[in-house]
Structures are given as C-alpha cells and as structure tokens.
Image (cartoon, rainbow, N blue to C red):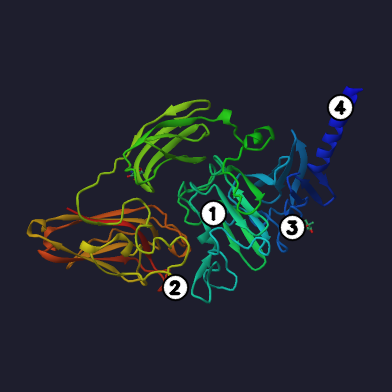
Amino acid sequence: MHLFSGAAALLALSQRANAAFGLTSTSSRYIVDTDGGLVFEVNRSNGDITSLKYNGVEYQGTGKASAINSGLGTSSVTGETVNGYVKITVKSNSLPVTQYFVAKPKEAIIYMATYNSKEVDPGELRWLARLRTSELPTGVHGNVGDTRGCTAFEGKDTFKCSNGETRCKMYTSDRFIDDKVHCVSGSKAQVCMIMPGTAYETSASGPFMRDINSQTGDSDQELYWYMNSGHVRTEPWRFGLQGPYAMAFTSPNNKPSEDLDMSFFGSLSIQGYVAASGRGSVTGSATGVPSQFETVVHWFNKDAQYWTKASNGKYTSPLMKPGAYSMRLYKQEFLVANDTVTVAAGQTATKDIASKEQNKPVIWRIGEFDGQPFDLKNGDKIERMHPSDTRMGSWGGSFAAESLKAKDFPMALWSKQGGTASVTFTLTQDQVKGHVIRVGTTLSFKGGRPSVKINSWTGNDPGAPVLIDSRGITRGAYRGWGDVYTWDVPSSAFKVGSNTLTLGVYGSGDATWLSANYILDALELQD
Ligand SMILES: *[C@@H]1O[C@H](CO)[C@@H](O)[C@H](O)[C@H]1NC(C)=O
Ligand SMILES: *[C@@H]1O[C@H](CO)[C@@H](O)[C@H](O)[C@H]1NC(C)=O
C-alpha cells in the first residue's frame, strides 16, 4: 500500500514535469516550453524563431523573425526529444547551413550550434535575434549602437545624431578573446549571447577579432553573435560546426556565467561536434612578456583556432581538435614569437614559447609596442565612436618629445583629413649620428602607411601594406596586420639642437575620413 502510493506520487510528479517541459507542434509551428520561464516557437517551414516568451512577456520583435543571417529560407525542420532534451534541426534547402536549437529542462536558454559547409553569400554568418526595443532598450555597451533619431552619414550603418554624437552597430563589438557573454537589457529581463569554451574554434581572424554585438532601432533590438564576416577579416573563413553557443534569458543585472556546459551536445547527434574525448591540448611556459601586458597564446590552422592567456609564465590550451597548428605568442596584441605544435586526441603536448622581442635603447618613444592604440590620444574612444564625433579630441598637431605624454599624441593619421603630426626633439653633439626610426601600426585603410621626414631628409615610401578591404577606424576597428616600419636615418639628417620629425600618410582615397589612413601602435627614435 505504501509502495503503491509512493509510485503513484512519483508518476504524478513526472507527468506534471512532462506537461511543462517539452515539445508540442501544430502543422506550422514547433512550440518548446523549457519549464524555466521560456517558451519559444519555431516556424516548421523555414526554422525562423517567431515567438520568445519569458515569464509571460513576448520579447520577439514584431517585424522580422529571429534567425541565422536573414533566415535560412525553405528548410527541412524536424523536432524531437532526445535523451531528455528538445532538439530542433533546421536544414536549409538553399543555403549550406544546418541550424540546431536545443532546450534543457528548467533553463531559460536556447542552446544552439550552426553547421556550415561553405561560406554563405555575401560573406557573413551570424545569429540575429530581433527582439523588442520597447522591452529591451539597452544595447551592448549602452547606446553606442542605438541609431534611434540619428541619420546615416557613412555607408548605411554609421549614424550621426543631432547632438553630434555618432552611432554604429560595430561600436558594440569586443575582442573574441574577451567576448564570452554579451547582453541587451530592459526593466524586466536581459537577453544574453553566451559563447563558452571553444565556441569560436570555427570562426576566423583570431583572438583579437571584434564583430557586431547589437543594434538598437525604433522597433527592434537586434542581438547578434557573429561567427564570421568580412569586417576587417585577416584570415580565410573556416567551415564546420560553429559554436555551440547559447541565448539566455535572465532577470536584469543577473549576467549569466560564461562557463556553460555544452558537453551534452555529444549525446545529440550534432553534425561536426567533437567531444572532449576526441580532443587534445598543449601546455608549457610562455615567457618574456613584461608583466604589465597580457601574455596571449594563439593556435590556428585552416580548420580551427584557439587561444588562452598565460599567467605566471605558464599556460594550458583549451581542448583542441587534433591536427598540426601554427602557434603565436603576443605581448598584449603585438606578435613576439612563432612556433608550431601537433595536437593528438587524448594527449597533452608540451611546448615552451618565449618572446623574441628586442628592445633597443631609444632617445624617445611615444606609446608602447603592444599592438593596441589605446594609450595614444583618442585611443580611449575609438572603439565606440567615429573619429568625427564631437566627443573626440582633435587630430594631428605639433608636439615636443621631451614633455610629451602618449595620451596627447593622436592614435591615427589620414592622408586627407586629420593632418600630420610632428615631434620636435633636441640632440647633443654626441647624438648627431645615424639613428633608426621605428613606427608600429595596428591597422591600415586603402594602403595608408607612414611617411617620415626629419628636418629636410625624407624616408623612402615603404609601399602599401596588404589590403584589408573593409572600413576600419571609422567603424571602431583597430586591429589588422600590425605592420611595423623602420627607416635607417643617416647622421646628415640630424643636427645639434632642435630637430623635427614629421609623420604623415602615403596613399590617397576619398577626401573624407575614408581617405588612406593608418592607426598607430607606437613610434620611437632609437639611440
Ligand atoms: C512560416 O514561414 C512561412 C514561409 O516563409 C510563412 O509563410 C508563414 O507565415 C510563417 N509562419 C509563421 C507562424 O510565422
Ligand atoms: C612570425 O612569423 C611570421 C610569418 O612567417 C613572420 O612574418 C614574423 O616575423 C614572425 N615573427 C616572430 C616574432 O617570430
């Protein structure tokens, strides 16, 4: 009798749970109740997400659906319950893409992964949730991508507002190495993209790539995860399984953890998913980077990419797919060593790597060779606004090396805008001899590269760097090839007393902020 009623109670409990968590369908829709406060609907003809209700409030926008790119078009859409998870598979008829939506009981999370066998025209792959601005008005990095009331003035994506401030969805981006959770929010909820573990392994352009995270318009708050794009791309695209990643609903000010366990994807027959048991890793020392800079280790081949930050001179890689990899060491973002390593499943390879950077004594140096322009003037703003924004400090100018602080020297130069920058410095008789000028850049646009002139001596044109065919600084990007230029300046160029270095730009382009330009990392006159 006791046994019987215990079993009956258990049965009743499990029926209640089943009634709440699970998949139901109509002829046109799959409806998923996560039993964690989130109920979402998927269109059975194209895999669009057409409803996202969290705690009874509809967050899905009223215009277009949430989907990969602008939708996968007519697709084969299947819904099933596998090992206690709801799994919806959307295989596009026209695009080389299969999208997975997965739900786990009691969580307000849509787990996702995107398999692509080729790049999708026009060269970008992204998850785009079109949410309601009325419910979620705050974008990633606040209003930097909020175009409401503002007018496009460069391309179709960069806006000027009546107060002279600028907005662009690119200004919401963060470095992939740091971008593990980003959210849009409102008074009742926030919605976050989570890219845990090795979610970026099939993306492109390395740890310092940045891409669009949100854009706030009158009706839609767009929340993105860009897997790849042509936005200052420095590597070929990779194909295979992108992610897994997730979109989570939480209460406001309750940012979800970046440590989201995705290992259950191993039991769901997801195309291209490689479980931990099929992976290996690399460990060792990473030394020689001064402690005020991050020590970053990066691995890549044509199929996968990984990175980690070393601490106390030691590193351990994430779990990587087997293969032969190029390996790089960065001082912050400045390349200081290369190597190669081979990873085998179930094994840990050992590889020590040390900085090869040689610091020469200098007469003066402006900025740090760290692959970033943030220590220079306007470097604190450039990721989040246009160089013409009224909040920006002036560009160009004349400076005296002896009293100069890096934060007073402009972080970029344009051939037709923003002027030249000159540095005066004093030499003694002993210092009138040959010197090397070294100029580090982080990104170039339309072939822009430094021109140097010392007094009446002019350095050779180093020639245009490899073109990255993408707007850069005007959309908040600073990271490209990181070209470093040096000139051997003869002693005859210098004189006792005051000397002037004039820094300018070779290259042309439009007579606007889109003329040839480059972003400075640092410059120095070596002793
Ligand atoms: C699902 O997609 C089809 C094809 O685009 C469309 O005709 C239909 O209206 C959509 N259904 C819903 C519920 O959005
Ligand atoms: C790393 O390798 C690249 C490509 O071969 C080369 O251009 C660069 O000078 C190397 N850098 C260092 C610091 O070893």
Q: Residues within 10 Å of mark 3 (few under 14, many from 20)?
A: some
Mark 2 vs mark 3: which is more N-terminal? 3
**Badge nearest the viewer, 2 or 1:** 2
Quadrant of the image occupied by residue 269: top right
Question: Residue 313: x, y in percent?
Answer: 37, 35
Q: CA distance from mark 2 to mark 3?
A: 38 Å
The residue pinned by badge 2 equals: 390
The residue pinned by badge 3 equals: 58
Position of 204 compared to 421: left or right?
A: right
Q: Which SS class for mark 1?
A: loop
Q: Which SS class for mark 3?
A: strand
Q: Where is 125 relative to 306, above or below? A: below
Q: CA distance from mark 1 to mark 3?
A: 30 Å
Is the C-beta separation of discs 1 and 4 under 8 Å?
A: no
Q: Where is 477 relative to 109, above or below? A: below
**Badge nearest the viewer, 1 or 3:** 3
Q: Residues within 10 Å of mark 2 (few under 14, many from 20)?
A: few
Q: Residues within 10 Å of mark 1 (few under 14, many from 20)?
A: many
Position of 367 compared to 263: left or right?
A: left
Q: CA distance from mark 2 to mark 1?
A: 29 Å
The residue pinned by badge 4 equals: 7
For badge 1, the amino acid type reads Ser
Is the C-beta separation of discs 3 and 4 under 8 Å?
A: no
The residue pinned by badge 1 equals: 229
